[in-house]
Image (spheres, grey):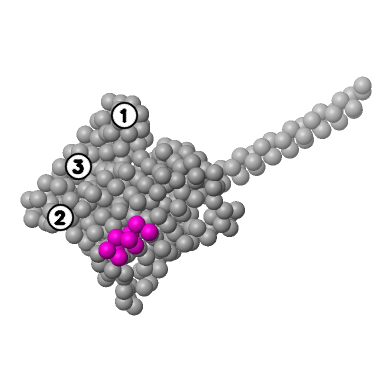
Amino acid sequence: MGNRELQLIYAIYEEYGEVIKMNTHSKTNDRTERIGIFYGIYVLAMLIFGTNGYLVAHISIQSSQIVLLRTLIGGTLLTVLVFLRGGFDREAIRAEWKTLILGGMALGLNWVALFEAYRLLNVSLATLIYYAGPMLVLLFSPLLLHEKLTAWKLGAVIVVAGGLVCISGSIALSGMNSVGLLTAAASALFYASLIVFNKRIVRTPGLQTAGIELDVAFVVVLIYLLLTAGLPHPVAADLPYIAVIGLVNTGLAYLLYFSGLQKLPGQSVALISYIDPVSALLFSAVLLHEVLTPVQLVGAVLIIGGAMLGELR
């Protein structure tokens, strides 16, 4: 083989190598861009969830009636989306139907208690107490989920408990609504129950789980209202806020939430999830002019910081 042929082979090899590098680099960039999109989608979902308190504050009907309309609109939208994607996985649902129903019940009661706490306390305090729910799951995880309670997790629970003492103590000393404190605590308990039930749902896809739980929540709240306050009769001024909380804050936000959840690492999901309470505090301060006392601010840092530490570890 002559020198010219060797040079030609070497040139072809170099060019082929550059093509491989370009293709690999292009694939890496595409993958990075896709992951970046899913991060953006998940962050957007958390920011949308953070506006719930602001919307509820502008709707005149009862909290349970708001939940009824929210679950009706959001559940219908997600159910339609599931059918457009090929329908429900009947075999998976048949295996997990009891847990799905319990999850839907917990979801409906969770929102009823939380929305009522928004009004009896305020959005900021209700949100902070509500986000103690995941810590309850950590504390009782050996019993409920057969998971080991490590020293790190126990420390996170203690930090959050300290934050709750700051919040509840300040409410008691300032003479704020004690019923609101109990209602917010109930929302945290239902939130913890929802987490436990959803952890036990392993076969039904996420979007289908959300659609089913919203539909079940609608039925549960409907029965409750028929026995108590009756069906909602919103005024004209309520309708835009009801439409947003149903279509955007439930239907769209849950679609974004599960789209990001399926593609992102678990630690990233845990960290980004706390954009929800932080943004809720910021929105309530800017849009609703709510102010936390210094003790309540310490409680907020302890609750959110402790919860993040427990999740990220």
Q: Residue 182 at x, y = what percent?
A: 18, 51
- Residue bearing mark 1: 142
Numbered label tally: 3
Q: Quadrant of residue 19?
A: top right
Q: Quadrant of the N terminus?
A: top right
- Contact flag, marks 1 and 3 (Cβ < 8 Å): no
Measured in 3D between alpha carbons, the distance from the residue under mark 1 to the one under mark 3, in whole angstroms, is 23 Å
- Contact flag, marks 3 and 2 (Cβ < 8 Å): no
Q: Quadrant of residue 5?
A: top right
Amino acid type at mark 3: Gly
Amino acid type at mark 1: Pro
Question: Where residue 179 is drawn, which disc sits there?
Answer: 2
**SS class of the residue under badge 1?**
helix
- Residue bearing mark 3: 163
Q: Residue 7 at x, y = what percent?
A: 85, 28
Look at the magenta stretch and give its main secondary structure. helix
